[in-house]
Image (tube, rainbow, N blue to C red):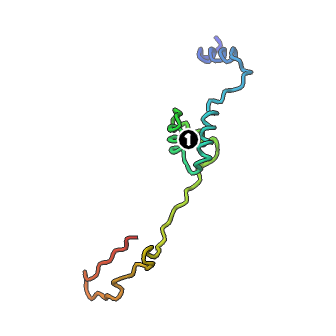
Amino acid sequence: MIGLPRSTYYRRAADAAADLDAPPVDADAPLREAITVVRRSHPAYGYRRVTHALRREGLVVNKKRVQRVMRSLLAPPLPRRRSWQVAEPDVVTGAWYPNRRADCIPTGADQLWVADLT
């Protein structure tokens, strides 16, 4: 007895019989290229939106595989710029919205209710 499990013996025998000189096959290369194409046109896309875009192109991909390949590319998505709305004058009249109750001085409770809807 060698003291070696049977599965290990057969695994090593199979590895020895295999062609070890052959270069390893990169199964993710086509997916990596497709992800790169999508990311060039949409750099802020994360793995979810990239997966959706690839599926629209007809590729059958899993989101976990896309996430793994994107992580291996070491290119995180760019943060999206937020669009802030700045208070501007009315386009038609050019006037700002005035505070119509600025001159009202309440003398008791529930006399003036104001809401800021910005």
User: Relative to 46, is 103 on the left or the right?
Assistant: left
> Residue 4's x, y, as percent?
63, 16
- The N terminus, quarter of image: top right
Residue 20 can be seen, yes or no: yes
Vertical placement of 104 versus 32: above or below? below
Vertical placement of 118 versus 68: above or below? below
Q: As rendered, which of 5 and 22 lies closer to the eye? A: 22
* Number of marks in the rendered image: 1
Q: Residue at x 27, y 89 (%)?
A: 107
Residue 3 can be seen, yes or no: no
Give the amino acid at mark 1.
Gln
Vertical placement of 107 versus 61: above or below? below
Quarter of the image for residue 73 reads: top right
Where disc 1 sits, the SS reads: helix
Quarter of the image for residue 105 reads: bottom left
Q: As rendered, which of 32 and 16 lies closer to the eye? A: 32
Label 1 crowding class (10 Å Cα cut-off): few <14, some 14-19, many 20+? Answer: some
> Residue 114's x, y, as percent?
32, 77
Vertical placement of 116 versus 52: above or below? below
Q: Residue at x 43, y 79 (%)?
A: 96
Q: Residue at x 33, y 84 (%)?
A: 101
User: Relative to 80, is 118 on the left or the right?
Assistant: left
> Residue 22's x, y, as percent?
72, 22
Q: Which residue corresponds to mark 1?
A: 67
